[in-house]
Image (cartoon, rainbow, N blue to C red):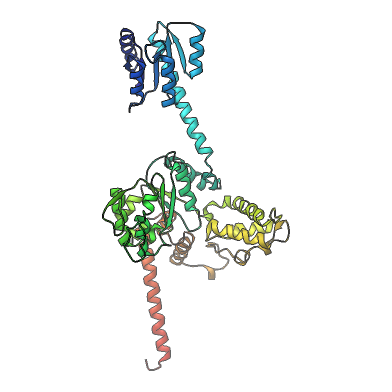
Amino acid sequence: MPMKILLVDDDETLCEYLQGALAKLDIDAQVCHSGEEAVTALEGTVEFDAVVTDVKMSGLDGIALAEKALSLLPSTPVILMTGSSALESAVAAVRVGAHDYLLKPIEPRRLALSVQRARQMRLLTDEVRRLRSLVSEPVVGELLGESPPMRRMKDLIARVAPTEAAVLIRGESGTGKELVARALHASNPQRAKGPFVAVNCAAVPASLLESELFGHAKGAFTDARTERRGLFVDANGGTLFLDEIGEMPLEMQAKLLRALQERMVRQVGGGQEVPFNARLVTATNRDLETDVHERRFREDLYYRINVVRLDVPSLRERSGDLLRLAHVFLQRAAEASGKAVKGFSPQAAEKLQAYEWPGNVRELENCVQGAVALARFEEIAVDDLSERVRNHQSQKVVLAAETTEELINLEELERRYVSRVLSLVAGNKTRAAEILGIDRRTLYRMLERESAANAQQHQSNGQSGASAGNPAA
């Protein structure tokens, strides 16, 4: 794109000459003939790649204009032009933070080169500032782990966080979906300054959810003794996080959809609609695609909240992070309890890695806290772990067989494998279909066949039982 600069000089002939010459070099110069006129331009909506101004002008001179420009737009470089080679002018230019200092007469190509360098410096400065803000972000640091699934998720968070896109976070219980939501909030330069408001839709009774989200007028119902704004308005300027959105009743889903479309909420018992300015982030452990298919979740609301989807990996999918997480939880628990526990025995670490963690990171943290409480030595032993972790037996689909009696047919092998995959993804049919390499419809047909076969087997067993109990049958 052509560069856009603000050219300021009270010499109209010089401005006309430079404007025409720079246009041939793909630089668009907007001309002002006074410092006061230039300040008005800087306060407008046009974004300039650089400000080029003469030092000596009546009224607001170039040095004062440079100071004003850098206070209004700190990242916009300023280039000063002067007919004086006096050292004092150069020192003044450096003191106010000017990018360059050019002596008249101005050669257009020399000015164009200075503008190009100023623009490159600005882009580099903006990129360094962006990267520094991402690296220093404390909330993202809570998302522990460097396994490939976690690196992919962190990269996606960094890309989508600065935008206003609605994000749907999907993951099993205990994977840290709220931590991801907080990372999205804290990594947005504008929203991070505002509040982060979270509500668990499954924890609020359906009869109270509308009042919780939209607020209520005084006297709207029996216990409404005072007016309440509601969480949508409370989250103004920040982020509203709706956890377990899949548990929201259908009637409430329709009201939520209307609020998101209109960017307005109506209090329960109120007559006026109130605007809100909050970014929406939602989360669920349900398979919403299946819920939409089975009409338990509105399709139009699903597409409204699912502009960008973030899948939080289960602990099984990021096994490389398990021991690192366990050590972090151990350090926290040891500090809180005042116990000198420093690590895990090799046998205990092996048990931790062998367990499948259906409760994910939350279950791991609880397990480690319990082990620290029971530990008698500096290392956690197998006996300090919970019984379910100590006695866990891995349930793997074994393809090898020692005798022909152990062999099963392909239909049974398929049934067992599909069942195992569904178990590992906590019943998420969409995720299971992705792992199996089939579409959801094919998976539905496979499950329907299995269900029909089980029903037929059950009916057959019932008839056999009736025949056995009634010899006359």
For the question of whether residue 298 can be seen, the reply is: no
Q: Write down the quadrant of residue 326 in the picture.
A: bottom right
Judge whether 157 appears above or below 368 on screen: above
- Indicate the quadrant containing the N terminus: top left, top right, bottom left or bottom right: top left
- The residue lying toward the viewer, choosing from 264 and 431, is 264
Judge whether 454 appears above or below 152 on screen: below
Residue 259, image x and y in percent? Answer: 30, 52
Q: Write down the quadrant of residue 119 in the picture.
A: top left
Residue 452, image x and y in percent? Answer: 36, 71
Relative to 315, 279 lies left or right: left
- The residue lying toward the viewer, choosing from 51 and 290, is 51
Q: Write down the quadrant of residue 228 in the picture.
A: bottom left
Residue 181, image x and y in percent? Answer: 45, 49
- The residue lying toward the viewer, choosing from 376 and 45, is 45
Residue under the point 42% across and 42% down: 191
For the question of whether residue 437 can be seen, the reply is: yes
Residue positioned most to the bottom: 472
Residue 85, image x and y in percent? Answer: 48, 5
Q: How many marks?
A: 0
Residue under the point 48% across and 27% down: 125
Judge whether 311 appears above or below 358 on screen: above
- Indicate the quadrant containing the C terminus: top left, top right, bottom left or bottom right: bottom left
